[in-house]
């Protein structure tokens, strides 16, 4: 245990303390403060003063209390045992804390993030001696049913592997390999550490070309996100940010999900903890918890640890990316993180910029979102991190600083609309205000899947929605009754699309998740109906006649009645729609 | 990460804490500053003597070598720089908890306010500790309030935090009283208690609540913490925390189901703003401090249930919306923390509809797990969703009608207007003493829905239509 005292507390201002420090204190060094040894981080040094943000409640802390240095930056532990776990913002395992101190989190409790007593079955994948480079995979551990945990050399370790353990059960601290580097010999264990504020290296960035399929129709079809992409979901309270993040955490086709509950509700974490183990990942057939890691720094937990939580989360994500996986990171909500930044900055008496946020807010946001991407790893694999951040704008007003700055660094914007949410149109993603810059990147993938139809179907529906928007303006002034049938058809089809396609109830067993094929067929059915109905109306059929067709009801219910496995049923509906409406286009009524 | 062990406290700390100082260097609003002191902790209790034998309580807001800043809960009026005596207690503010607190009334700082002596029992820090998310038990039990707008469309569950967003002159008092009177878990007869925190409300308002609890036969199980309008506003910072400390004790130590009423949270936030402005902190919106969200969360998050413990804390805070503005920082940040909101609407109130619970902006986020087969009824979710959708359409059509006139509307649109009217008059509206069962509420919902043609009911299954539509 280190007894290196680097300073003494001079002033306590909430979660920030000022300490008189020795020459020895380092910037961004992890420190322990006072008799309870509260975890803190040095965030500014000026002459003989060090400012420390403290990750635990500072109640009772007094001037004169010692500050102990560790000589290390704030870091996370990376190794087998992370998956399925739940950690606070500085990676303290919440289940272990509970076992130690009970149902409430008290301060000054320390526990290693990774279980030191658990044995893992290690299978070597290389033989010693052999030349090795940083990030190379030297073996693997089956961590969960869904995740094969690859044991990598730390990125900085290169040289010659002179020893590797034989297959067998090891503790995370056991030496399983030894590398001779230019600086001497280094032991390799099943786990490693990495400072959270530094991004882990990769070989090169790659362009995005594959969609991250989320199973949410409005997302995949209208506003897709590419693997390695970045998305922001802004919305006022109760508009569905958390629901969409949970839906993605459940159904998106990433290999691993890191869910960061940053300054949000305790019950939402509990919900994940109770629901996920019971849910089955449709792709792997394994429990969803087997591919999920939770970072939970809820709104009532210390604010400085909230600031750290997104770095803890993204660093863990990078580690799994380095194994070659496609990782999705959800951060709910980045506004709470920005507010933590604001509070800490205010306590340090920094000059505020817009709405009290520090001037470096955009830089920090950029740094966070830049850690997403599609890359070639040091081990040579293609892997990605897709980041989806929620933003909670005050008063639901998107012109505020966090939404505006974030917009500069992301390429997909899912704007949640209060009015849609009020009408219980979920997901309340506005088709007018949202956008995705990944459409071109992913269209190749979709075209292959849909016999080259995706682009034109998508363009078809977008044009209908645009015409509807124009017509709505007229309707608002004079009512829909005065419009000719051909225009009322546009309104009806738009409404069909909203109700039957865009709306997707996250609680419905059949509809919670929708495979790509089903999305495509549903869209095609609506477009085919529209085209034939336009024809029929041109031939003199009344819209009222078409509205009475049986297929209208079937289209309305198709999302519930045709499950993800009932693709033939949808093809059949498509044929029936064609037949039913085409009858009217040849024989005028 | 290294894991050092905590050192034992040095024995002389305790002695030093008790040290008393005479004289302060600055008094400004509710805040005093002192120099020449030693060994004082952050967020700790201070006792301030005004030199005339009266003792006031306060708390340190900032401590540094040789100096401290403290807020005085009971205000600073009459304090003099030289004669003010300050004693540091070396511990945070606590209240006493024991079964004896039931039926008692305390002031905003947790001291007896009913003439009876201080209860004997255990001292608990009012700040509480955050619940470990892994220890929470997810709330799922439907509480029947007997109010259709709540039970049918914004269902309350045990352990939820569901505020009422109100405006001046709107009947939130009556609604809170009605909920407390009628709330029950169907088929269960567990002990329940009410913890009431009154912040900045008038004396007669507090009396109204207490009387209504009494009438509901709950008085022996009510604990009140009152910091009324004439009490110094800074004291309100403590009031909800004292109340929740009592609630946690009743729920998690004694196994009771506790309903916590916090009113009015907007007054609470104003007290916070006052202190923050006084300290010249950088404000965020409307002068409220940047940490308002975290501060409110430290109150609202003290609701819920814990695995393996009997009781529960259900919170119904009252949040008034200045100028009926739901985007005002207090309701806005509350909405971001609580699990839904019951919004009262002036327009409904003016049309004589009680309870004037707004159809669209109201929401209960925990509803989904508390309703359905075996809890309320299988059709509940679809019915509620369809009522919301229909009512949203009504709002659009009313807007249109105000432009083109009702006569110009299509027949379907006119039917919608009729549906809207029926929904408000029959479903929303009910007597102040009318206690509807969930079945009555749902059947009423169907009756109202049956005004609409069945082709309009997209969110209902064929089977449900057959079973309930037009019956
Ligand atoms: N896809 C959906 N299906 C069904 N219900 C939904 C869906 N999306 C949102 N909801 C409803 O909306 C409510 C609010 O959603 P959610 O909790 O995600 O809001 P939020 O934007 O995260 O709010 P806050 O900012 O306050 O956390 C949910 O409790 C649920 O009732
Ligand atoms: Mg949320």
Image (cartoon, coloured by chain):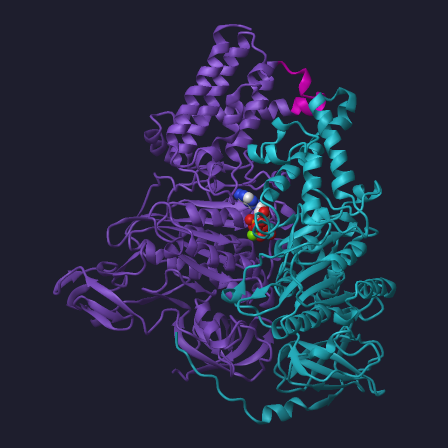
Please name the residue shown 48% across and 50% down the image.
Answer: A246
Image coords of residue A28 (percent x, y): 44, 69
Tell me if residue B457 comes above or below residue A400 in the rendering: above
Image coords of residue A297 (percent x, y): 51, 63
- Of the pair A235 and A550, the residue shown nearer to us: A550
- In reply to whether residue A481 is colored magenta, the answer given is yes
Residue A432 visible in this rendered orientation of the protein? no
Residue positioned most to the left: A129
B386 relative to A137 in the view: left or right: right
Q: Which residues are magenta?
A: A473-484
Q: Residue B75 occupies which quadrant of the picture? A: bottom right
- In reply to whether residue B117 is colored magenta, the answer given is no
Colour assigned to chain A in the rendering is purple
Tell me if residue B2 comes above or below residue A387 in the rendering: below
- Of the pair A340 and A152, the residue shown nearer to us: A152
Colour assigned to chain B in the rendering is cyan
Tell me if residue A570 comes above or below residue A531 in the rendering: below
How many dots with numbers?
Answer: 0
A9 relative to A22 in the view: left or right: right
Q: Magenta residues: mostly which secondary structure?
A: helix
Q: Quadrant of the N terminus of chain A?
A: bottom left
């Amino acid at each position: 245990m280190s007894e290196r005292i680097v300073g003494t507390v001079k002033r306590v201002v909430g979660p920030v303390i000022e300490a008189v420090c020795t020459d020895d204190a380092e910037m961004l060094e992890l420190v322990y403060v006072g008799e309870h040894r509260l975890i803190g981080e040095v965030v500014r040094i000026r002459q003989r003063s060090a400012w420390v943000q403290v990750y635990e409640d500072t109640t009772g802390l007094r001037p004169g209390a010692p500050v102990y240095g560790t000589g290390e930056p704030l870091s996370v532990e990376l190794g087998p045992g992370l998956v399925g776990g739940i950690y606070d913002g500085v990676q303290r395992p919440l289940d272990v804390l509970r076992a130690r101190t009970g149902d409430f989190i008290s301060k000054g409790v320390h526990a290693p993030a990774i279980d030191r007593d658990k044995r893992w079955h290690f299978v070597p994948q290389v033989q010693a001696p052999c030349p090795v480079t940083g990030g190379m995979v030297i073996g693997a551990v089956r961590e969960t049913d869904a995740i094969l945990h690859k044991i990598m050399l730390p990125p900085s370790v290169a040289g010659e592997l002179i020893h590797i353990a034989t297959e067998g059960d090891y503790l995370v601290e056991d030496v399983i390999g030894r590398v001779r580097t230019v600086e001497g010999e280094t032991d390799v264990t099943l786990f490693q550490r990495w400072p959270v504020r530094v991004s882990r290296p990769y070989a090169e960035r790659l362009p995005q070309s594959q969609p991250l399929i989320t199973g949410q129709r409005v997302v995949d079809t209208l506003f897709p996100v590419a693997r390695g992409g970045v998305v922001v979901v802004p919305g006022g309270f109760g508009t569905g940010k958390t629901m969409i993040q949970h839906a993605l955490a459940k159904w998106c086709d990433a290999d691993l999900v890191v869910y960061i509950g940053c300054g949000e509700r305790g019950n939402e974490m509990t919900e994940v903890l109770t629901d996920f183990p019971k849910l089955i990942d449709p792709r792997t057939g394994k429990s969803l918890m087997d591919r999920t890691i939770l970072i939970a720094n809820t709104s009532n937990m210390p604010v400085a640890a909230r600031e750290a939580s997104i770095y803890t989360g993204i660093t863990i994500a990078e580690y799994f990316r380095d194994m070659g996986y496609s990782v999705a990171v959800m951060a709910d909500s980045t506004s709470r993180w920005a507010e933590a930044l604001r509070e800490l900055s205010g306590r340090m008496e920094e000059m505020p910029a817009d709405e009290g946020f520090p001037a470096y807010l955009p830089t920090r946001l950029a740094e966070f979102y830049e850690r997403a991407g599609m890359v070639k790893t040091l081990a040579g694999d293609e892997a990605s991190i897709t980041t989806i951040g929620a933003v909670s704008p005050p008063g639901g007003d998107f012109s505020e600083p966090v939404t505006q700055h974030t917009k500069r660094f992301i390429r997909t914007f899912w704007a949640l609309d209060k009015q849609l949410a009020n009408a219980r149109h979920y997901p309340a993603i506005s088709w007018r205000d949202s956008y995705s810059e990944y459409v071109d990147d992913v269209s190749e993938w979709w075209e292959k899947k849909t016999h080259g139809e995706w682009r034109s179907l998508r363009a078809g529906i977008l044009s209908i929605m645009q015409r509807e928007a124009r017509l709505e303006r007229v309707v608002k002034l004079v009512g829909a009754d005065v419009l000719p049938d051909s225009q009322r058809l546009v309104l009806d089809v738009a409404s069909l699309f909203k109700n039957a396609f865009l709306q997707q109830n996250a609680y419905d067993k059949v509809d919670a998740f929708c495979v790509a094929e089903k999305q495509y067929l549903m869209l095609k059915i609506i477009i085919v109906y529209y085209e034939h109905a336009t024809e029929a109306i041109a031939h003199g059929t009344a819209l009222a006649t078409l509205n009475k067709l049986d297929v209208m009801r079937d289209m309305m219910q198709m999302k519930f009645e045709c499950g993800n496995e009932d693709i033939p049923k949808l093809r059949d509906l498509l044929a029936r729609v064609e037949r039913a409406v085409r009858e009217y286009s040849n024989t005028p009524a | 990460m290294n894991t050092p062990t905590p050192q034992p406290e040095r024995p002389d700390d305790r002695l030093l804490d008790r040290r008393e100082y005479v004289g302060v260097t600055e008094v400004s609003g509710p805040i005093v500053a002192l120099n020449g002191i030693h060994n004082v902790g952050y967020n700790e209790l201070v006792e301030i003597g005004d030199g005339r034998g009266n003792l006031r309580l306060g708390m340190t807001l900032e401590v540094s070598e040789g100096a401290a800043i403290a807020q005085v809960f009971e205000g600073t009026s009459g304090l003099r720089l030289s004669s003010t005596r300050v004693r540091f207690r070396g511990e945070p503010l606590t209240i006493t908890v024991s079964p004896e607190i039931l039926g008692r009334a305390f002031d905003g700082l947790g001291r007896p306010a009913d003439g009876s002596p201080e209860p004997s029992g255990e001292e608990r820090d009012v700040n509480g500790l955050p619940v470990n998310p892994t220890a929470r038990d997810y709330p799922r039990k439907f509480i029947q309030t007997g109010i259709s707008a709540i039970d049918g469309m914004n269902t309350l569950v045990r352990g939820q935090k569901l505020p009422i967003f109100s405006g001046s002159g709107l009947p939130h008092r009556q609604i809170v009283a009605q909920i407390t009177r009628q709330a029950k878990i169907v088929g269960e007869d567990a002990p329940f208690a009410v913890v009431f925190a009154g912040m900045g409300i008038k004396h007669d308002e507090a009396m109204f609540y207490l009387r209504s609890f009494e009438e509901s036969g709950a008085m022996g199980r009510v604990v009140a913490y009152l910091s009324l309008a004439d009490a110094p506003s800074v004291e309100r910072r403590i009031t909800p925390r004292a109340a929740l400390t009592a609630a946690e004790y009743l729920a998690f130590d004694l196994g009771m189901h506790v309903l916590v009423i916090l009113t009015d949270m907007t007054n609470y936030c104003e007290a916070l703003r006052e202190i923050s402005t006084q300290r010249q902190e950088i404000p965020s919106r409307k002068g409220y401090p940047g940490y308002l969200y975290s501060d409110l969360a430290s109150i609202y998050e003290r609701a819920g249930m814990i695995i393996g413990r009997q009781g529960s804390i259900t919170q119904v805070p009252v949040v008034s919306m200045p100028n009926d503005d739901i985007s005002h920082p207090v309701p806005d940040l509350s909405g971001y923390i609580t699990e839904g909101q019951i919004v009262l609407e002036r327009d409904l109130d003016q049309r004589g509809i009680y309870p004037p619970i707004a159809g669209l902006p109201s929401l209960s986020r925990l509803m989904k797990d508390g309703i359905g087969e075996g809890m309320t009824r299988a059709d509940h979710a679809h019915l509620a969703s369809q009522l919301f959708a229909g009512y949203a359409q009504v709002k659009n059509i009313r807007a249109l009608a105000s432009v083109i006139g009702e006569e110009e509307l299509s027949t379907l649109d006119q039917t919608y207007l009729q549906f809207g009217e029926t929904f408000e008059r029959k479903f929303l509206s009910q007597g102040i003493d009318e206690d509807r069962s969930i079945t009555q509420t749902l059947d009423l919902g169907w009756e109202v829905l049956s005004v609409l043609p069945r082709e309009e009911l997209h969110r209902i299954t064929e089977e449900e239509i057959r079973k309930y539509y037009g019956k």
